[in-house]
Image (cartoon, coloured by chain):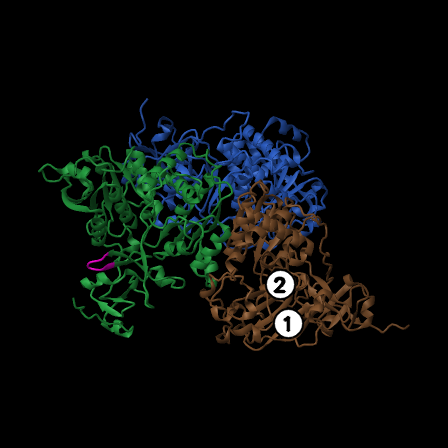
Chain colours: A green, B blue, C brown
Amino acid sequence: MSGVRHLVSIDDLSLPEMRELFAFAAKFQADMRAHSHIGRGLISASLFYEASTRTRLSFESAMLRLGGGTITAADMRTSSASKGESLADTVRVVGGGYADVIVLRHPSEGAARLAAQYSSVPVINAGDGSHEHPTQTLCDLYNLWVERGRIEGLDVVLAGDLRYSRTIHSFAYALARFGANLVCVPAPGYELPDYVVLRLREEFGVEPQRADASRLGDLASSSDAVYLTPQKPHQLSLFTDARGLSIERVDAVYMTRPQTERHPDGARGLENYVQLGKRSLAAESLRDAVVMHPLPRRDEISDDIDSDPRSIYFKQAARGVPIRMAILGYLLGVVKLATDQRPPEPHFYNVPSTTNPCPNPTCIARTEPRHVTAMFKLTSRFPLRAHCAYCSHELKFHFVGCSTTLHYHSPESPDLRKVRSDHFVFLRDADEAARLGYAPAVKPKT
Amino acid sequence: MSGVRHLVSIDDLSLPEMRELFAFAAKFQADMRAHSHIGRGLISASLFYEASTRTRLSFESAMLRLGGGTITAADMRTSSASKGESLADTVRVVGGGYADVIVLRHPSEGAARLAAQYSSVPVINAGDGSHEHPTQTLCDLYNLWVERGRIEGLDVVLAGDLRYSRTIHSFAYALARFGANLVCVPAPGYELPDYVVLRLREEFGVEPQRADASRLGDLASSSDAVYLTPQKPHQLSLFTDARGLSIERVDAVYMTRPQTERHPDGARGLENYVQLGKRSLAAESLRDAVVMHPLPRRDEISDDIDSDPRSIYFKQAARGVPIRMAILGYLLGVVKLATDQRPPEPHFYNVPSTTNPCPNPTCIARTEPRHVTAMFKLTSRFPLRAHCAYCSHELKFHFVGCSTTLHYHSPESPDLRKVRSDHFVFLRDADEAARLGYAPAVKPKT
Amino acid sequence: MSGVRHLVSIDDLSLPEMRELFAFAAKFQADMRAHSHIGRGLISASLFYEASTRTRLSFESAMLRLGGGTITAADMRTSSASKGESLADTVRVVGGGYADVIVLRHPSEGAARLAAQYSSVPVINAGDGSHEHPTQTLCDLYNLWVERGRIEGLDVVLAGDLRYSRTIHSFAYALARFGANLVCVPAPGYELPDYVVLRLREEFGVEPQRADASRLGDLASSSDAVYLTPQKPHQLSLFTDARGLSIERVDAVYMTRPQTERHPDGARGLENYVQLGKRSLAAESLRDAVVMHPLPRRDEISDDIDSDPRSIYFKQAARGVPIRMAILGYLLGVVKLATDQRPPEPHFYNVPSTTNPCPNPTCIARTEPRHVTAMFKLTSRFPLRAHCAYCSHELKFHFVGCSTTLHYHSPESPDLRKVRSDHFVFLRDADEAARLGYAPAVKPKT
């Protein structure tokens, strides 16, 4: 199946690719009726294992605007799946001749990765549990690009439920990758999780700083905000003076609803949830800021700013169609980009053992183990840290074995450097190690 | 959003527009495959908040026959709406770029009016509760036009459940508007409601008369029928002789099923429900009558007349496609009419108060108040009568206040003539008036 | 409605028609994007009274690849049907103008036959209960034709649940009709039912023989298999030698899952169910055999042979699209065949009585009697045997009456020869006969 490009994660696209896709989207948007020859004879299949009408309609509209056709399974759970078919088999059939591209929505994290392993046509992840939704991120970036002409160096406020919003996390990584600055003004108790900050730091060299948010007015519930700057030379220069960091003029405010369905204790503490309205938008620092929201909104954006020219959230949703036209066309091979710069291929390693080490109970590797190859991605060699290749959760283990020597090591052991990544076996504890036939490593003599 | 035409009510089309749409429909029907270039590149969105497969398929077929594409949410209630999104927001997103026209079905009366307020693309009402279903009415009229060559002056029998059938009410208004005569032969206990007769009289000058129905044979359960004549000169001439009115030859029989789902006491008294069959069709007065039914039927039309050439109910349904092609094409701007005669714009007035005066519990203004502006339509100045702009229910009030003087009046008071319509505040009773700060009007000195 | 071709049963196509359809399918398959001009302006309606996403997507993909449009009711049971509409009425409306071809899935046996009686456009049976699914059979045959270049004389192993699999029964009849040989290796307890063997013998002259299956290896759970040979001259010659019959080299293995949903006692005895894997495929006799499966599979095909070049089950499913393009195009009149050889028209006779003689409780004639004409097909004159024209179940009766003489006879009586087929009345017993006014036949004098 090599050669087929998928969009499982936003990381599957390089920055130059994204920039060109933005330009294509803008061209499509300029005349939505003028491109219905591009995809003639091509078919997209919407395989939705949970309902998400908005996302589905947006993709189907994009495919139709390209002149293609769509086949739709809006609720896969009540259909073939009930006869016990695995996702891998479904994808092989649908991708084998029914459709030229598969748009997949699934409640299990990692489902799109699994589908991509088996599909002979491109798979687009339209949301896999609380993991990724790359076209939403792409759409958000496209909106910034349209409104501001660039993404690099922008100051973007992330507001609301920064803790449980998948959209915010993906958007934050992508903004950091593009070199934008993040200003975090969470609702109290809904701060960005540590693992997100850690990944921002490790992968993108982002430095968090306390900043004075008093000029953000009502929007910031306290006078503090966290300012996250990707460590790129052209940005460091912005803060070379000795003054303390203060948020002055921002380019965009990205608001999110409380993700109550994911809150462990229901809707607690939401009485202090930030609300964006006429009053908060009056802050001087927001004078030129566009207001974004992934929708649907509840009360976190008041209706009284709907007609404010800075409120672009309805436009933002509408722009989902041209950007999806661009990505569909690109993966289908009918939109040609000038760049040949691909993102680095992710290196996945199999786990040569019968136990699946992913700790996430809603990972596809655990909800539907048939056809899954336990795989991980190495995120750090010393100490050894690895993430599930499907759902990106960090693997939990106390020891790492070598499948050839049958010795095991502590993740901090320098001896691990001599073990090949594809021989790693993650062992929960000494008991498991013993049960699987692994012995503690003997310190080699030098 | 001005400039965009919607089809919320059949009143949104003028008679000349309808006549031209009939002609276009006939042209489409003559060769259903020949028009697939007209709507190329255009997309319709079916947003169905309750299932209605027949109506949905008819619209989607029409859009496809025009060469356009369709995106479908066959059951919106299980999707985005479950994340708490308002209809106004959904419509702004879908109409913002996903689709070029929205076909909306909703269980709340007035939903289409609300949608039209917020949509930047045409909204077609495909049924809003028990309120309106204008393309059904348009289809019925088109059928008469095809079968009889005109609608003016036709004698049309309305039979069955005239009390609870939305279809019958809308059809009756439209027939009266075109100047056709209505012959009401209800099932016993299922007579046309007073408010429908009242509106027929007030808006279209219709005069009800008792008529001898004995020549209708079995169809009329008693020898009496009610004959409703629009007061137009050319029709009055039909009855200038001194004889009592008797139903002679009729042009069409429009039959309806009992609307048991709306009957307050279930299916009571249906044992005497009229049935149309070989025997009743044998009546001399029905010799040339076409038999119509909005379908689905139950037993009120016997299978034994299915092959009778006068039975056009299956053709009637099939003709829903070409007439919907015409209306879709017209609203999308790709079917051009010669006439520029528009129907009178409905004048709606806001209610400048915080209480919503609509008494209808299933009105969209009450089921989904967010984004609703309480609005009314003035149907009479003296005594003052007003209807909800969404669901058309008559507002119930004992006093009318003026929002500038804060005085209130009886609906019969001549002083009300001095109050501007957009200052009206409808007050249930003196208590509410007092609570809202209104005082009884002092009789002005002259 | 004469003149319109339907695909209710695989018997509705002649062998030359099928062969030409295979050739068209192969042409379509060679370039799936190149045929989107053929069906422009045409519409298919998917009317699915039970969910079957796989089948539906395959048909819709085929229609789109022909350049046509699709309208979809993926779950008819929650829609119009709930307003009490009969299948016959639905089909008359949808086929009257909404669509140019109807693809029908229904839980009742015989539903497609009923629909075809009333539809003015072609009806394609996409599965009627446990009765027929002709395009599945056509697809299976097409796969053999593609892989082997012919169907005549092939040795095809049928393995697994031969008792309850509708697919297997239809496939067996069709293979016999083409003159292929069947090798039955059922899971123990899941043998081909007697009535299937009987029909194979009576209609296609198939001769069952015990055969030595030891060379099939693990696949055959015992050393015995049943070999079914259509009695055609060119095949008899294969076995003219005196040796006992032994299965040597086979051309295809058709595997099925246990149809647990139809098992009277749930999943009993499945522990010995045959499984096809690396080991069983190693048998010498299977060296060139292709492995087929209608999918979805469970464990009866092990994942370890998914990449074996003989495993064509995913290709098999994918080929459902081009063969459905061919049949859709043919029935729509846009794919023209050279042959004018039609299959013999089935002769159906009405039952002139008020009792419906079909013993099958899930036959459409009993689940939805409105618009049904009780009809039968005569399968033997002496003794008299007849099958329901809808569901193909054999009628059960002790006596046969003549509706003109009001006499009744034993099914074995030679006097029955004098009774016209369309006068037959099937009488359960003497009581029923008496109740309906029939008397025993008096032996006529000669």
Residue B358 visible in rendering: no
Magenta residues (range): A380-385
Image quarter of the C terminus of chain B: top left
Residue A5, compared with residue C237, is above or below; it is above
- Front position in the image: B241 or B66: B66
Hey, which quadrant is residue C426 in on the image?
A: bottom right
Q: How many marks?
A: 2
Query: Residue B417: where, in percent of width, then height?
Result: 38, 27
Q: Quadrant of residue A404?
A: bottom left
Asked if disc 1 and disc 2 are in contact, CB closer than 8 Å, the reply is: no
Q: Check if residue B308 falls in the magenta segment.
A: no
Q: Earlier in the sequence, mark 1 or mark 2?
A: 2
Instruction: Answer few, some or many: residues within 10 Å of disc 1's Cα (few below 14, many 20 plus, some between 14 and 19).
Output: many
> Given the image, on which type of amino acid does mark 1 rest?
Tyr
* Element under disc 2: helix
* Residue at the extreme right of the image, as rendered: C446
Quarter of the figure that contains the N terminus of chain B: top left
